[in-house]
Image: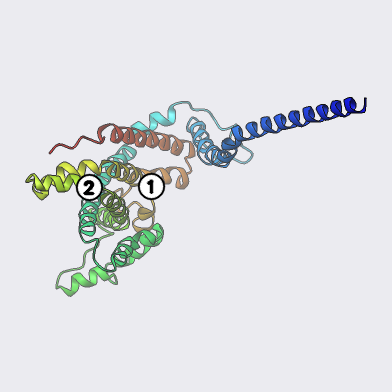
Amino acid sequence: MNNQVGLKRKHKTSCVLEEEEMTKRRNYGTVKRYLPYLYMSPTVVWILFFMIYPLIFALFMAFKRFKMQAGLSFLQMPWVGLENFIDAFADKFFLLSIQKTFVFLFIALSIEFALGIGIALLLNRKRGIKLDFIWITMILTPLMFPLIASGNVWRMLFDTRWGLINGLIMGLGFNSINFLGDPQGAFAAVLIVEVWQWTPFVIIILLAGLRSLPLEPMEAAVVDGASKWQVFVRIIMPLLIPQILVVLLIRGMDIFKTFDFIYSLTFGGPGQSTTLVSFYIYRQAFVQFKLGYGAALSWITFVIIYILAVLILKFIRPKEITL
């Protein structure tokens, strides 16, 4: 009798333990299933709060007219529909700023890419030299400067009377050049600062790509009689397409949003000569306090940048290597 009672208790205890084990496994499976979402939640919250919410708020603001009136909340501001967007496409200064931005984008990106690929090839060729890291660190130095600080430093360098650049020009026997007071000179000055600041980024991306390329295709091409130019055009460049795509996407979008150099160097002048689209939006929204109109201009710019990125992704794709 006692043995039967003991067996029943033992069986009952084992059943309870099995149920507890199964419960633990289910709980662990549930936690394991939702753990990735828990890890992602801070990023999702950050994106929603700092990216999605401002975009939606700016979209709503683009359909309203901002009025500085005591006691007038955002919801009470007058709804104007598409009026801000219609005014934008009729605004000749906005259209001119877009045109100047595309010109600036083409020139700056072309120079940065040409310098970047040239210096990256040189550094890759001389990778065996001693103290290679020192040269790379020196090249990356402009990236370490805050953009506003870079603009202020270059403004002093371009100064007509006390600037180092004009000092060198006058030392060579030429007259000083009013870089920031002349429309063409001011545009060139902003372009020089842009290229100086961001060419190191292009260099480091392309250099990383060059140093990751396999040597076998290039060696085989040389054995087959290919020249250095043929190796560069038909092997190196196609293999560098992923890195080139990164450069064009990031720098293309960044150049389209250029603001800091213009603010510290020329403040959009003289006249409208250096007023790119981002600075024009700043003037409309935060100088003239046309926040609704500025939001509409921002959304138009956002769509242009998006289309530009899609075109780059569509037309620049990795290609097969043909010798």
Are circles 2 and 1 on residues that touch, CB within 8 Å? Answer: no
Q: Quadrant of the N terminus?
A: top right
Q: Quadrant of the C terminus?
A: top left
Disc on res. 237 = none
Residue positioned most to the bottom: 171
| Nearer the observer, 172 or 35 | 35
Residue 314 point in image, percent of width and height: 28, 31
| Nearer the observer, 141 or 13 | 13
Residue 119 point in image, percent of width and height: 22, 57
| Nearer the observer, 215 or 319 | 215
**Disc 2 residue crowd, few under 14, some 14–19, many 20+, Cα 10 Å:** some
The quadrant holding residue 70 is: top right
The quadrant holding residue 4 is: top right
Numbered marks: total: 2
Q: The disc labelled 2 sits on which kind of residue?
A: Ser
Q: Is residue 160 above or below residue 320?
A: below
* SS for dot 1: helix
Among the two numbered marks 2 and 1 on one chain, the one whose residue lies closer to the N terminus: 2
* SS for dot 2: helix
What colouring does the structure picture have? rainbow
**Disc 1 residue crowd, few under 14, some 14–19, many 20+, Cα 10 Å:** many
Disc 2 target residue: 110
Q: Is residue 187 above or below residue 70?
A: below
Which is closer to the viewer, label 2 or label 1? 2
Real-space CA distance between mark 2 and mark 1, rounded to the nearest whole angstrom: 22 Å
Q: Is residue 215 above or below residue 92?
A: below
Residue 278 point in image, percent of width and height: 38, 44
**Left or right of 176: which side holds 26?**
right
Residue found 31% across the figure and 48% down from its top:
272
Q: The disc labelled 1 sits on which kind of residue?
A: Phe
Disc 1 target residue: 279
Residue positioned most to the left: 225
